[in-house]
Image: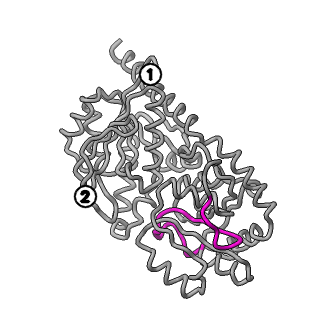
């Protein structure tokens, strides 16, 4: 048991059930911090028939008043509710994971109470303005990111290259790189999903415009024109599904593409284990947790250079490939090479599995704990200078 435990409050509009990589990250990180002897509570959204408060794997979960805006649930607790949660849990540090009303209200309450605050920069302004009604607010949201980013004690970035970007944008707060954790502890006991073809490609994530799935469908169509026995699994939900299904029919590939819908993590694991290659074709992405998870299952990955962490995730030709997000032929060429060479797939997959060890939950939790303690130590030194 930790001799000097912390009481941490994490704030995330997505948590349980998790619909995004951020929610999955917060689930795993909170559990691991509890296992390290810390006290963790979560403030998140509330859906119909969900309890206002519950214990989940040692984590205290507070669900607050929620509205659904632009397809996303957003928690809207009152400042009084936030203050009471902080006091009831004797919170020593606040960790934000979403830029929204929840963060803005909690930041103000925490500042008045003198609580240290950290923020993980999961989403860029490109993420936050993907819904078309949000696009006119891009400049306002950019200013809000800068405004709040400079109020925190620490900004955590999941991708190294993100630090350069946000420094250029004007973030002056100390920045630390801490990866998202891979959720899966073991892959050996996972039963692979049944394979409908000799070569299976997998995508998992939202079916939204920023995920750039037309690139994958066009590249897959080129693969099928070579008479290869191939199939494509698409796991996830989103507002583009009907459009993507129509595109499959127009490309003549509908019979080889399976839309799997939302999959629980335990079920998604079966598709990681059953596929031959994982593709993340995104136009907007910070780290790409699903690609990291595929690496954990010893699968080669293909990502686009638009992903901020592309060069961290992929060493070209060693554990996968990086392609242009606008050139289907480039992706098709990589898929073709992998389809025709099982030994290449194995070699790249083994390298990816080794690389994935850097994203172990234990390492991430230890890094978070060090960051929290460094924040608190910095606060103590500052107070000593100010008050003697």
| 270, 381: nearer the viewer | 270
Asked if residue 203 is among those painted magenta in the image, a careful observer would answer yes
Q: Which residue is mark 2?
A: 67
Marks 2/1 in contact by CB < 8 Å: the verdict is no
Q: Which residue is mark 1?
A: 377
Residues in magenta? 192-216
Rendered residue at 43%/31% (across/down): 34
Name the disc covering residue 11, or none: none
Horizontal and vertical percent for residue 256?
61, 78
- Foreground of the two, 264 or 118: 264
Q: Secondary structure at mark 2?
A: strand
Residue in view at x 62 percent, y 48 percent: 189
Q: Is residue 378 above or below residue 103?
A: above
Measuring from the top left, give residue 342's x and y in whole percent: 79, 64
**Is-magenta flag for residue 217?**
no
Say which of marks 2 and 1 sits in front. 2
Instruction: Give whichever of 1, 222 is nearer the camera.
Output: 1
Q: In this image, 368 relative to 103: left or right?
A: right
């Amino acid at each position: 048991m930790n001799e000097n435990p912390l009481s941490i409050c994490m704030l995330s509009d997505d948590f349980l059930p998790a619909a995004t990589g951020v929610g999955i990250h917060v689930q795993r990180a909170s559990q691991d911090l509890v296992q390290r002897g810390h006290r963790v509570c979560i403030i998140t959204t509330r859906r119909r028939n969900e309890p206002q408060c519950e214990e989940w794997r040692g984590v205290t979960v507070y669900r607050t008043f929620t509205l659904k805006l632009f397809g996303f649930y957003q928690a809207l607790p009152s400042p009084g509710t936030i203050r009471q949660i902080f006091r009831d849990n004797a919170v020593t540090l606040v960790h934000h994971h979403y830029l929204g009303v929840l963060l803005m209200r909690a930041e103000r309450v925490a500042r008045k109470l003198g609580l240290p605050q950290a923020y993980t920069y999961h989403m860029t302004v490109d993420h936050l303005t993907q819904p078309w009604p949000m696009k006119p607010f891009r400049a306002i949201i950019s200013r809000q990111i800068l405004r709040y980013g400079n109020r925190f004690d620490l900004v955590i970035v999941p991708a190294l290259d993100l630090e350069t970007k946000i420094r250029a944008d004007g973030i002056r707060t100390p920045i630390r790189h801490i990866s998202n954790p891979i959720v899966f502890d073991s892959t050996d006991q996972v039963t692979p999903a049944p394979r409908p073809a000799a070569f299976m490609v997998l995508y998992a994530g939202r079916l939204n415009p920023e995920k750039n799935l037309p690139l994958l469908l066009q590249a897959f169509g080129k693969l099928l024109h070579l008479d290869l026995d191939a199939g494509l699994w698409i796991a996830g939900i989103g507002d583009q599904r009907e459009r993507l299904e129509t595109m499959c029919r127009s490309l003549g590939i509908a019979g080889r593409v399976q839309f799997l819908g939302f999959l629980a993590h335990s079920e998604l694991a079966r598709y990681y284990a059953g596929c031959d290659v994982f593709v993340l074709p995104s136009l907007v992405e910070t780290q790409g947790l699903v690609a990291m998870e595929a690496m954990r299952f010893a699968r080669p990955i293909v990502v686009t250079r638009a992903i901020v962490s592309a060069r961290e995730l992929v060493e070209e030709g060693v554990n996968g490939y990086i392609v242009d997000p606008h050139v289907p032929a480039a992706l098709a060429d990589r898929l073709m090479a992998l389809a025709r060479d099982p030994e290449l797939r194995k070699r790249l997959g083994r390298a990816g599995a080794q690389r994935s060890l850097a994203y172990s939950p234990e390492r991430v939790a230890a890094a978070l704990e060090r960051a929290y303690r460094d924040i608190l130590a910095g606060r103590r030194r500052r107070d000593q200078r100010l008050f003697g």
